[in-house]
Amino acid sequence: MSYVIAGYAITFGSIAGYALRVRWRTRSLQRALREERG
Amino acid sequence: MTSTIAPTTVETAPAPRRKGWIGPTLGAAALAASAAAAVQGLVVMGPTANQGQYSRLLVVHPPLATGAYLAFGVTVVASVLFLIPRTRRPEWDQLAGASAEIGVLFCALTLVTGSIWGHNTWGVWWTWDARLTAEALLLALYLGYLALRRVPAEETVRGRRCAIAALVAALDIPVDHFATSWWRTLHQGSSISLTQPDKHLDAAHGVGLLLGFIAIALVYAWLLGHRYRLEQLETRYESEGLSLALEERRAEGVER
C-alpha cells in the first residue's frame, strides 16, 4: 500500500509543485516588467 | 553631429488580459475533483484479486497518459494553425509551447506511476516493452521540443521550426496508443472497451477511473490557462527588453 500512496503523492505533489513554479515565475516577470517601466 | 535615428514611440505587445472568474473556478473544480479521485482510489475502491492494492493506481495512471495525449494533441493543433500562413499568429505558438510543457509533466508522471505499478505486478521497475518504450520516446521527443523552443531565433523562424518538431514528435502518439494491439506486450491492453462488453470494470473502479479522467482534464485546463499567460508574459518581457535597449541606443544617438 505504501507504493500506492507514494504514486498518488508523487502525482499530486508534482502537479502542485509545477503550479507553484508557474505562479512564482509569473509574479517575478510581472514585477520585472513593472520595474522596467519605472 | 546629430544622429539620423529619430526617437519614436516604443510599441510593445498588448498586456495579457487579467484573469476573471474562470481561472479560480477551474482551480477550485480541479482541486475538488482531485480530492474526490484520491478518496475514491485510496479509500472507497477495494483491492482486486489479480493486482491487490496496486489496482488503486488505475485512478491516476491511465488518466495521466490520456492527459499527456490531450496536451500534445493541443500542441499539434496549435502548431498546424501556426504553420498555415492564413491563420499564423504568435498566440498559436505560445499555446503550443504551454501545452507541451504540461504534456511533458503528465508523460513523466505516467512513466513514474506505471513503473510503481509494474514493479509490484511484473516484478521489474522497467522493461523495454513496446508501450513503455514508445511512452519514453514520446517524453524524450517533447523534451527535445521544449529545448528547441529555448534556441534563440527570430519569432516566426523559431515558431515554424518548433511547429514542425511538434508534428514530427506527434507521430509517436498513435504508436504509443496502439502498441498493446500491434505487438505482444507485457503492458496490458485497455481495461474498458465500448465495443467489447466483456471488458468492463466493477462500479467502484469505473467511478474511480472516471473521477481520475475528470480531475486530470480539469487540472490540465487550469494549468494551461496559467502557463499560457506566463508564455505571453515571457514574450512581452523579451520584446520590452529589446525595446528598452533600442530606446537607449536612440537616446545615445540624439545626445551625440
Image (cartoon, grey):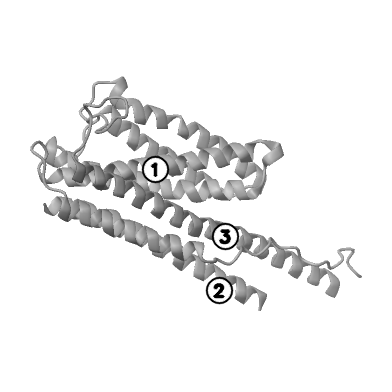
Task: Write the residue at 29% across / 41% down.
Answer: B62
* Residue type for callout 3: Glu
Q: Nearer the viewer, residue A13 or B35?
A: B35
Q: Can residue B78 be seen in this view?
A: yes
User: Percent x, y for residue B27?
Assistant: 41, 62
The reply to the same-chain question for discs 3 and 1 is yes
Kind of residue indicated by mark 1: Ala
Instruction: Tell me what residue is drawn at x 18 percent, y 42 percent.
Output: B117
The residue singled out by tag 1 in the image is B68
Identify the element where label 3 is drawn. Answer: helix
Give the secondary structure at mark 2.
helix
Label 2 marks which chain's residue?
Answer: A
Q: How far apart are marks 2 and 3 (CA)?
A: 12 Å
Q: Determine whether, in the image, residue A21 is placed left or right of residue B136.
A: right
Given residues B132 and B214, the one toward you in this image is B214
Q: Are marks 2 and 3 in contact (CB under 8 Å)?
A: no
Q: What element carries label 1?
A: helix
Q: Which amino acid does label 2 sit on?
A: Arg
Figure check: B30 above or below B194:
below
- For disc 2, the marked residue is A31
For marks 3 and 1, the one nearer the N-term is 1
Q: Residue B234 carries which label?
A: 3
